[in-house]
Image (cartoon, rainbow, N blue to C red):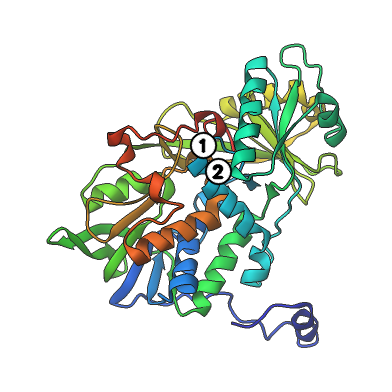
Amino acid sequence: MRRYSAFAIAREAFRQHKGWSEAWSSPEPRKQYDVVIVGAGGHGLATAYYLGKRFGITNVAVIEKGWLGGGNTGRNTTIIRSNYLQDPSAALYEKSRALFETLSQELNYNIMFSPRGVMMLAQTEHEKRGYLRTERANALQGVQTRFISPSEVRRLVPIINIHGPRYPVLGALWQERGGTARHDAVAWGFARACSAMGMHVIEQCAVTGVDSANGTVTAVNTTKGRIACAKLGIVVAGHSGALADMAGFRLPVESVALQALVSEPIKPCMDVVVMANTVHGYMSQSDKGEMVIGGGADQFNNYTQRGSWHHIEETVRALVETFPMISRLKMLRQWGGIVDMTGDRSPIISKTPLGNCFINCGWGTGGFKATPGSGWAMAELIARGEPGPLAEAFSMTRFREGRFIDESVAAGVAH
């Protein structure tokens, strides 16, 4: 893999940039691999990367029915945080946040990680008590958060209206080391690193069936032919239920759309991420000046990847009270992503009833922030056949056993 650097850019400038090679190769699939991972989004590519880096497993194919990063990875709102209430969640998301901090250097690819800070507004007394509880739980978990006053909220976000008639700002849970990253760049960086290790990233290759013998997976059938594998990882977000059905088991998930939009670009006015769960919205400003806005997931099951006017109206109407200035902005574009929701709003990283078949799903509205941590945990599960410390609480059997990891408050609204 050719190393990217300022010197490489300068050298290529004198050669009319004719010396750059493709960031990752696009080979035809081989007949057999040690591991096949279905889904070339951030989580699938991170899984492949850590399989190679941590366990030396490089005979790996990552197959994708569309284009690399064209699913939820390219349709999220880039937020990274780890201020969750339950211990298993906090451990997993904090691992991920820590990995994000050095991921650009590790991958030799600029993912544009920006630790600008994330605040979750408390706009009711009940919400304030909940965030104070989370602050203390985070202290025990080693996650750096603190509850800040309305005046400090206003100092950090001058455009905010803290005296809203319905929902005044009573404070906020502030995670200074949270932030954002460029979602596409995360996928591209992992793909480049995987390709450099000799792995195959195969696009436009949809799975049509899963073969098994004696209760163990043997191959996947695809639009590019049958691919035999010793182990199979399913990492396909909102389509997890469909892939599980092909493999012969059911999942406790449901798929819904999560919508977002961006405004026209404006001058810098907000350099932190703000989540307002009471009014059901969150907002940050991109490097290009767009206000990135999102809200809650759709209330009905669907597989759409486009926005709807009534949902955007609900989200913006709620945010206008807290951020009056956005009422004057024009919408630039809107979109939707298909998210897979579990009953407790926590993910599944687990073995399945089919031998040597493993699944990573159920991230709901908060999958992007977990990308490297998810890959770390899933790679360990595939390589060893048993979950490690990060993944052991997220088994799919927990719903039958009553071991819920309830993060409905932290994950059920927005990121």
Give the amino acid type for the residue marked by disc 2 in the picture.
Ala
Q: Work out whether 331 lies above or below 279.
A: below
The residue lying toward the viewer, choosing from 292 and 142, is 142
- Dividing the picture into quarters, in which one does residue 158 lie? top right
Q: Residue at x 69, y 43 (%)?
A: 144
Q: Mark 2 highlights which residue?
A: 90
Q: Mark 1 highlights which residue?
A: 86
Circle 1 crowding by C-alpha within 10 Å: few under 14, some 14–19, many from 20: some
Quarter occupied by the N terminus: bottom right
Q: Residue at x 36, y 35 (%)?
A: 403
Circle on res. 14: none
The residue lying toward the viewer, choosing from 65 and 123, is 123
Quarter occupied by the C terminus: top right
Percent x, y of residue 76: 58, 46
Percent x, y of residue 404: 39, 34
Percent x, y of residue 295: 60, 31
Q: Is residue 363 left or right of residue 166?
A: left
| Marks 1,2: beta carbons within 8 A | yes
Give the amino acid type for the residue marked by disc 1 in the picture.
Gln
Circle 2 crowding by C-alpha within 10 Å: few under 14, some 14–19, many from 20: many
| Farthest residue, direction left | 214
Disc 2, SS: helix
Disc 1, SS: loop
Task: Measure the C-alpha gap from mark 1 to mark 2.
Answer: 6 Å
